[in-house]
Amino acid sequence: MKPWSTRPHDSSSDICSSVGSSEIERGAAPGITGLPERSARRVLNDTIAAGLLASTTPKGSVSLRFPDDALEIRFLKLYPQT
C-alpha cells in the first residue's frame, strides 16, 4: 500500500502535513504520528521510500517532496500530468 493512499489513520499524512514548508528531524516522527518509536520509524522510512519525503543525508532532517505519481492524489487533479 502506498503511503499516500487512504487509511483509517494515515500516519504518513501526519508526517507530511507537519513538514509543511520546512524540515523536521527524524526523531520527531513518534510525536507527530502518535505511534511507538519503531512503528513511527517504519512509517517515516516508508514515506521516504515512496518519495514523499527526502533528506540530503541518510540521518538528516527530512523535507516534503512531490513525486509525479502522488500529484493527482495530493492535489486533487489540479496538476494533470503532461
Image: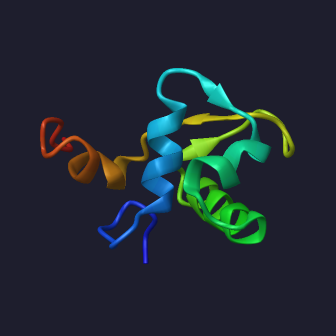
- Residue at 86% across / 43% down in the picture? 59
Give whichever of 46, 31 is nearer the camera: 31
- Residue at 50% across / 57% down in the picture? 12
Vertical side of 35 occupied by 69: above or below: above
Q: In which quarter of the image is residue 81?
A: top left
Q: In this view, does 45 lie to the left or right of 82?
A: right
Vertical side of 65 occupied by 21: above or below: above
Give whichever of 9, 65 is nearer the camera: 9
Q: In which quarter of the image is residue 80?
A: top left
Q: In this view, does 79 lie to the left or right of 10?
A: left
**Which residue is outermost to the top?**
21
- Residue at 43% across / 78% down in the picture? 1
Where residue 35 sits in the image (x, y, percent)? 63, 65
Where residue 32 sits in the image (x, y, percent)? 59, 47
- Residue at 77% across / 33% down in the picture? 56
Q: In which quarter of the image is the C terminus?
A: top left
Q: Is residue 4 visible?
A: yes
